[in-house]
Amino acid sequence: MALVELDGIHKTYHMKGVSVHALAGVSECFEEGEFVSIMGPSGSGKSTLLAILGCLDRPSRGTYALNGQDVSLASDDSLSEVRNREIGFIFQSFNLVDQLTVLENVEVPLFYAGYSHGPRREKALEAIERVGLSDRTAHLPSELSGGQSQRVAIARALVNDPVILLADEPTGNLDSATGSEIMDIFQQLHAAGRTILMVTHDENLAQGAERIVRLMDGRISNGD
């Protein structure tokens, strides 16, 4: 059984009397431990697909099974639990809380998961150490470089030990050298058995994944 199973996923948005078909029958499986790049031109459906994979949106039609659980018809509360327990998100814009330190930012998912202070702090410190920022735990996001901010975001995504990491243009706000450093972290996580699905427009970055899934007009066009 694949970790992620998509079967006939459609997503249609209705805006001002116009129907926009963002996804038009996507079927794909992602195995545990895979590192996959998802590519496609603007408007191809990449962001919509990632939102559905991350349980941030629902398909209009079709089924999505994550770790053996059909989440396509799950309640809002169930989806919230799945997001916090099973999925780690890494965004292009980092999405750190400006008023919180590095340590506190990484602790946020554990707070919502109900961890008490001691275990929460211990797990957060371990995640921060994994991305090489143990000397920055008391710093605010405004005191970090872009690369350091993305490392914090990766630590936060890892801290709950999710079954899958979803990365949306994770190097889009970084220079090429820093982007390569972030890609090295993904490679290390993949080597350690993490499942990573990464949306990117960067062909060179995409080639660092195990395989590439390409979208065109809401459909999978080919993979390599």
Image (spheres, helix red, strand yellow):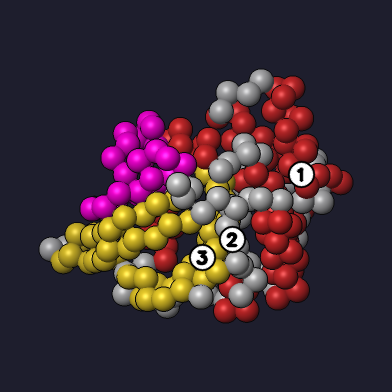
Q: Give the residue drawn at x 31%, y 34%.
A: 75
Does residue 114 appear to the left or right of 49 in the view shown? right
Q: Residue furthest front?
A: 1
What amino acid does circle 3 point to?
Val
Q: Is 73 colored magenta in this rendering?
A: yes
The residue segment tinted magenta is 55-79
> Residue visible at 81% across and 49% down?
133
Residue furthest out toward the left: 17
Name which residue type carries label 2: Phe
Alpha carbon separation for disc pair 1 and 3: 24 Å
Report whether residue 98 is seen.
no
Q: From the image, tell me which residue sits under label 2.
A: 35
Residue 84, compared with residue 149, is above or below; it is above
Residue 184 picture location, percent across and down? 74, 64
Residue 199: image tag = 3
Decide which of tag 2 and tag 1 comes sooner along the chain.
2
SS at badge 1? helix
Amino acid at circle 1? Ile
Residue under numbered circle 1:
128
